[in-house]
Amino acid sequence: MILPRDASLFCLFLTLITTSCTFASNQDANNPHQDDLLPPLESDFKSYPNLANITDEERALFHPILKFPTHFKKIPVLDCTQATGLATESQRKRSKIRDKLFGLVWRNVIVNLITDSEVVRKVPWKSSKWGFGKYDEDRRAMYTSSVFDAENVVDGYSGARTVHLGIDLGAPVGTKVYAFADGVVHSVGYNEGHGDYGFVVVIEHTLPLSSTKIWALYGHMDRATSRNKSPGTPIQKGQVIGGIGDCHENGGWSAPHCHFQVSMRPPMTHDMPGACSVQDRPIALSEYFDPRYVLGQIY
């Protein structure tokens, strides 16, 4: 039977719709990273995929990345969803002047004293100097810099990037940052954008038990971090990588901290998308795993 022309077009339309729905259904069935299978934002430790298969036994062999003061019973978890956190231009200028005048004394004497000895039990630092910034936290109010705009693509990630892909380790300027395991320098440099990483180093770490390779980014560091490092430079577990930078060198952040992020693939350069868009969250969580698998259950 020959259908009228209009009826033929209608049947073709139904066929295309049916085929499209079947394809979409098969895609959903074959995609393990659908939104409904992801843990909610800011989920508990071990809710996220353990992509590097780091065991508790292996984690016990890692060196602390920061030595937090022993007089704190609990390091506070910071809410990074409210304020911008970016330093003003005058703040950055003052920090640069302060660094030139007192940098060596501050970084090499005072900070070393309060972070490396039992004096930390008596030093009355405000708890706000220390803290953790969460992994997989949506920071729409904080990420106001153009660095996070949709047009700024980092390692293939675009869109308005607001979901945090690392953990922030808050501490005073100059606090030493250590390598958690052996490795080699993948890349080192300076990301100068306001709200970017500032001085940063990426290390290719080899996990001690499994020999798995992962890439860790240590961001918002001081200028000394880039010295005597180049791709291929060997790094030993517990080696001082550098110090936490002030706002004139850490990318312009008023609260000094180290952004620690771990990846299952090497980045293209000394950069990783420290945040992703909500739309890219499924793929991002399959590449940048929860740093608590390295740091332990810090919150």
Image (spheres, rainbow, N blue to C red):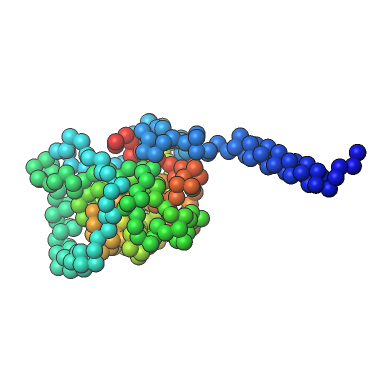
Can residue 107 be spotted in the picture? yes
Q: Position of residue 16 (x, y in %)?
A: 73, 43
Q: Position of residue 90 (x, y in %)?
A: 20, 67
Q: Position of residue 287 (x, y in %)?
A: 48, 45
Asked if residue 190 lies left or right of residue 123, the reply is right
Q: Residue at x 16, y 53 (%)?
A: 111
Of residues 116 and 289, the one nearer the viewer is 289
Residue projecting furthest to the right: 1
Asked if residue 259 lies left or right of residue 1, the reply is left
Asked if residue 128 is positioned above or below residue 39 in the image, the reply reads below
Q: Residue at x 14, y 68 (%)?
A: 101
Q: Position of residue 259 (x, y in %)?
A: 33, 50
Asked if residue 224 is positioned above or below residue 62 in the image, the reply reads below
Can residue 222 be spotted in the picture? no
Asked if residue 42 is positioned above or below residue 252 in the image, the reply reads above
Of residues 167 and 106, the one nearer the viewer is 167
Of residues 235 and 6, the one nearer the viewer is 6
Asked if residue 149 lies left or right of residue 142, the reply is right
Position of the C terminus by quadrant = top left
Q: Residue at x 91, y 38 (%)?
A: 1
Q: Residue at x 25, y 48 (%)?
A: 170
Asked if residue 70 lies left or right of residue 211, the reply is left
- The image shows a total of numbered marks equal to 0
